[in-house]
Amino acid sequence: MDAYEQITRNVSEVVTEAEVRALADSPDGKRAYVGYEPSGVLHIGHMLTANKLIELQEAGFEVVVLLADVHAYLNGKGTFAEIRETATRMQEQFVAYGLEESQTEFVLGSRYQLDEEYILDLHALELETSLSRAERAMAEIAGGDTATVAQAVYPLMQALDIVYLDVDLAIGGMEQRKVHMLARDTLPSIDADSPTCLHTPLIADLTTGVGKMSTSTGVSISMEDSEAEIEEKVNDAYCPPTADPDPTDEGEERENPVLQIFEYHVFPRFGEVVVERPEQYGGDLSYELYQNLEDDLESGELHPADAKGALATYLNELIAPGREKIRERTE
Ligand code: NAL
């Protein structure tokens, strides 16, 4: 696999291909980052972008994790003191998950976001941006259905952070794409470069395959889950024998979340997957490529129940170190 393929593996969108190719040509010392609102324990959505950061560390990038405390506050996630405490816990969970501590710079947003120079740059972006554009950028991120002034400031700060953290490559889930497009369009107005971006896919709702998995609605998987909870959630997951299920009767698109988790979580971290089966059902199956597992599910060679059993085992292994950290903290 060449460097460009490695960097863009499993991503939904590359902005732009030429810019990412230029980074791939000389990744050493280049900085990639993801920002996270500290809002509880690590869940499977955080873990998906973290997988990309781990891959980028392996490709030679420096990795920056922004613990976006001020953003979480603007998005109504709690008091400032609570959010700060959560940020510390999340940092520990990211390291437990596999981000190499010596190669990761963890930055608390409030460390620089309250400086005079930053605030004046923020106001300059406010002058350049219509309220409707800021609101549209936040549609997939904001909680609640009433847009607040705080939520309009939020994407402008996210844009500015890309400049202040001196980042070469901004990474986020597809729900961040409109914020990144806003950043690309408005940062030149303060003489900053437009950021290069990678957007990772969103995993569908676990029980229906419709829409996206969310911690606020529906079932999600997090580092707090016990082994039994993981098994139960995966067992109840929607998993027809295809990667491309028919739409619902209402015409909503559907995905196979079990296959998505294999593709975006299990294969990137484990490289190889073994599905254990008793000899009477054909014995163990082993896969080095996600595509072969998908093909076997479609052909009937791999039964959904066996796929789910293996998925629960691998997810538990990914979550175990973080779960242990959380246990230490609550003892
Ligand atoms: C991501 C978030 C907040 C601030 C950021 C600043 C720079 C780059 C990325 C950032 C969190 C993200 C979320 N908007 O929805 O969790």
Image (spheres, helix red, strand yellow):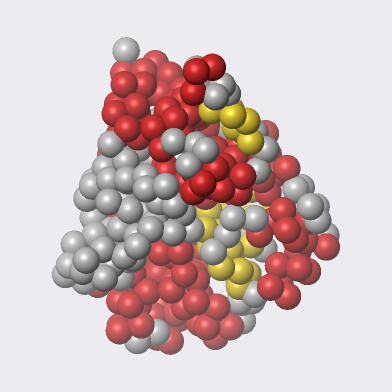
Q: State the residue lying farthest toward the top.
A: 331
Task: Please state the total of marks drawn on the protein image.
Answer: 0
Q: Which corner quadrant holds the C terminus?
A: top left
Identify whether 35 is placed above or below 175: above
Q: Is residue 84 left or right of residue 26?
A: left
Residue at 67% from the left image edge and 63% from the top image edge? 168
Identify whether 17 is placed above or below 265: below
Q: Is residue 108 left or right of residue 99?
A: left
Residue at 49% from the left image edge and 48% from the top image edge? 298
Can residue 108 be seen here? The reply is no
Residue at 31% from the left image edge and 21% from the top image edge? 228
Point out residue 64 in the picture as x, y percentages from the top left corner.
Answer: 59, 49
Q: Is residue 201 left or right of residue 33?
A: left
Within the image, what quadrant is residue 76 found in?
Answer: bottom left
Identify whether 140 is placed above or below 266: below
Within the image, what quadrant is residue 90 found in?
Answer: top left
Can residue 32 be seen here? The reply is yes
Point out residue 132 in the picture as x, y percentages from the top left corner.
Answer: 30, 84
Nearer to us in this view, 163 or 279: 279
Point out residue 171 in the picture as x, y percentages from the top left corner.
Answer: 55, 59
Nearer to us in this view, 242 or 312: 242
Point out residue 324 in the picture as x, y percentages from the top left corner.
Answer: 43, 19
Nearer to us in this view, 161 or 57: 57
Residue at 39% from the left image edge and 84% from the top image edge? 129
